[in-house]
Amino acid sequence: MPDTNKMGRNAIWLTVEKALLKIDPEGIEKVQSMLTQHNHTIDDCFDNPQALRDTLCKLYGNRYDEIFESILKTLSGSLMKSGINDFIKALRR
């Protein structure tokens, strides 16, 4: 049986990476670095989406909404799986 939390974490990470690549090719490195400064990792973001939201808001300001919409669009088919719906609700401002 697959580990649904791990699948959810992987889906979140790939989705965030895709969203960031559209607006900032170095975005993943910036987000990882900032999360690390606050004792978080990308894996932590599945259980603590607030850390990701805060990081994205600090780094991208008004462009956060663009990133959020990209994440939402990509994950829309998976919203009821693996806690992804809770993750999206936490990212919404």
Image: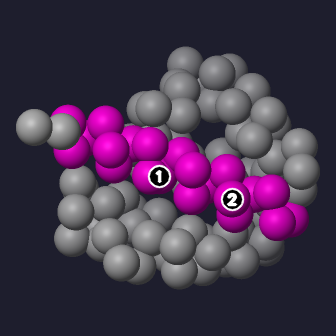
What's the amino acid at mark 1? Ile
The percent position of residue 75, horizontal first and vertical second, equals 44, 70
Q: Decide if residue 15 is on the left or right side of residue 23.
A: left
Tell me the quadrant of the picture where the N terminus can be found: top left
| Residue visible at 60% across and 79% down in the picture | 69
Instruction: Tell me what residue is drawn at x 52 percent, y 73 percent.
Output: 74
- 93 or 43, which is in the foreground? 43
> Can you identify the residue that label 2 sits on?
18
The stretch drawn in magenta includes residue 2 = no
Residue 85 vertical position relative to residue 12 in the rendered view, above or below: below
Judged from this view, the residue extending furthest toward the front is: 1
Residue at the farthest left position: 1
SS category of the residue bearing label 2: helix
Which residue is under mark 1?
12
Specify few, some or many for label 1: CA neighbours under 10 Å numbering under 14, 14-19, or 20 or more. Answer: many
Identify residue type, mark 2: Lys
Does residue 22 show up magenta in the picture?
yes
Q: Position of residue 52 (x, y in %)?
A: 55, 47
Residue 45, relative to residue 69: is it above or below? above
Is residue 62 at all visible to an observer of this figure?
Answer: yes
Q: Is residue 75 left or right of residue 1?
A: right
- Circle 2 packing at 10 Å, graded few (<14), some (14-19), many (20+), is some
The residues tagged by marks 1 and 2 sit, at their Cα atoms, a distance apart of 10 Å
Q: Nearer the viewer, residue 26 or 62?
A: 26
Q: Residue 4 sits in which quadrant?
A: top left
Quarter of the image where one finds residue 16: bottom right
Q: Are marks 1 and 2 in contact (CB under 8 Å)?
A: no
Stretch of the chain drawn in magenta: 3-23
Q: Position of residue 22 (x, y in %)?
A: 82, 66
Residue at image coords 45%, 32%: 43
Q: Earlier in the sequence, mark 1 or mark 2?
A: 1
